[in-house]
Amino acid sequence: MLKNFFIRQLKTDRRKKDPFLLQTGRLKDGILATVYRPGWAEDVHISDDREKETVGRSFNFSKITFLSLVLTLFLSVILAKSAWLQVVKGEYYYWLSEGNRIRIERIEPRRGVIYDRDKIPLVRNKANFLLYFVPADMPEDEELAGILRRIGAILGNISERDLAERLAEVDSGSLAAYQPLFVADNIEYEKAMILYLESANWPGVILSNRTSRNYLTYAPDNGQSGFSLSHIIGYTGKINERELEQFGEEYLPIDYIGKMGIEYFWENELKGVSGKKQIEVDALGKEKKVIGQEPPENGHNLVLSLDTEAQIKLENIMVEHLSKRKLSRASAIVMDPENGEVLAMVSLPAFDNNVFARGISQDEYNAIIGHPDHPLFNRAVSGEYPSGSTIKPIMAAAALEEGIITDHTTFLSTGGIRIGEWFFPDWLAGGHGRVNVKLAIANSVNTFFYYIGGGHEDFKGLGLDRIIQYDKAFGLGAQTGIDLAGEADGFLPTQEWKKEVKNEPWYIGDTYHISIGQGDLLVTPLQVAAYTAVFANGGKLYRPHFVTHILTADDGLIAPIPVEPVRENFISGDNIDIVREGMRQTVTTGSARRLFSLPVPAAGKTGTAQWSSKNDPHAWFTGFAPFDEPKVVITVLMEEGKEGSETAVPIAEEFLRWYFGERKK
């Protein structure tokens, strides 16, 4: 019975599944047979024809073009995207992928050392702990917040918020994310050791041992600062965004660069060439092993013409004289007239460049910037002042060269010259009597220079155009080319300038004024020293400079700096000698008689430059020694020092006495 039940059930199920099935039964010999209803074959045949007919009608061959266009567009999009990823952005994604495992790091070269003329080092490199981030390796969310919080707590001078803001400025999808992001430098040793140990487990946090500069002041024993070297040597500091844009791939955001002085002007020689190393990093971005390495080329060392002992002595003398007169601003230059080498250059007040090298605080910076005497300002090269009577040797040489006067020409000084309602005075009431060019230089007789500059009555002077011509020949109105940044041009007024700026015509009084170094004429102390050297050496104008030799990092000679006159033979030797004799008489009988007792004979010219109706005049002296074979030119400017003979000459006298007397002993 059970068997018959299963047979019936099977029949029922098969009928449900096959509409053409009629019955199922067992034939003899136990063979299971299936019987279909009549007409099933025809039904199937008809169904098959209809299906084929439907398929044929549903496929519209006219749509092949449309499908081809869609397929072509689809393939074009794929190809364009592939080209964008592989060609346009290929390098980016290559470095993005490689940055996860293989990276190129720079090896910092050692910055060159700066020596004085006797190979005394003026700067040295010292260890500097620097902390930076690699943003691409930094974690996110709570882990990052914890790291930043801990770093802020260790350093003490930066907050978690500040660090987070710095990171937020970096686009995580850019190559900048793989560039170092500066955090702090000049980190104290104890803090650096804590950071070193803990940063081993902080992804993207790197403590680096780099170098920074330590400037040697060689302060004198009397407690003076010795900071006047700062204007010459300058300092280095962390590179800023503007400098990064200017110098491109040569620097990283954590690099240091020369900011002022020799450090700035000779940056390319001092910085060296960075090395490279290819490293494999772990998941934290830490170095696992070095794959390849290219060593750096250390920077070149520089030898300066600077005489450190003379520099500190001159600064010491000037500080004492300023203090005695309750003044604070002055500058002085000592130069070799035979080649333009600067032996000493002092600008007061000065500043401590180590404050900048170690990382100046905002309060310290504000104190320096807000100082009324502007200690960062190098008065020797950037200060522009009326020349006063120090211009008179140039005026005398020009008049002699143009044949307007000879050494025998004389004019009567009765106290000044009157032109209509205007009176142009001598400094001595009643005048100096009849004087020639030598006496006019020695006693600084204004009347003589009014005559040769602007003329008077029947006598025709140089006139403005020729005055400007000779001023330019002696280097005025343009930079001297010294290897320090920030040099000023000075200023030579012209008729066109006065008409355009002041809307006034040029008067004869204007010519008289510039003939004695007043009016709108402006010079720098360095320009005055440079043209004084022309009279000292017999007629050659040299470019003042500091660097004399470039050395390798091991002090091997690379090359001396060539020294050639900028201009020579533009004044005849005879006329130079006449002016020199007048400058010698300034010391023997004139306004600088205080120098007569020096160990060696000297020559020079004093100057008193009026620049304000409310403030005292500036005091000048410029000269050279020994007279027969000059070894040094010295130029002194004391701002608001009144008479040059009273305040500037004593500084020159004390220095020259030491230089040619006590020092040699």
Image (cartoon, helix red, strand yellow):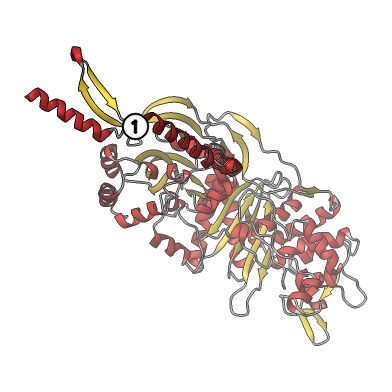
Whether residue 113 is visible here, answered yes or no, is no
Q: Position of residue 344 (x, y in %)?
A: 58, 50
Residue type (three-letter) at the residue carrying disc 1: Asp
In which quadrant is the N terminus drawn?
top left
Q: Position of residue 563 (x, y in %)?
A: 71, 41
Is residue 186 placed above or below 528 in the rendered structure? above
Whether residue 498 is visible here, answered yes or no, is yes
Task: Tell me where residue 377 sits by quadrant.
Answer: bottom right
Q: Which residue is mark 1?
A: 282
- Residue for point 88% across, 66% down: 409
Is residue 545 placed above or below 83 in the rendered structure? below
Q: Position of residue 564 (x, y in %)?
A: 75, 42
Q: Position of residue 311 (x, y in %)?
A: 54, 49
Which element carries disc 1, helix, strand or loop?
Answer: loop
Left or right of residue 466, residue 69 in this image = left
Left or right of residue 373, residue 201 in this image = left
Task: Tell me where residue 133 sits by quadrant.
Answer: top left
In which quadrant is the C terminus drawn?
top right
Q: Return the residue nearer the eye: 287 or 488.
A: 287
Left or right of residue 462, residue 232 in this image = left
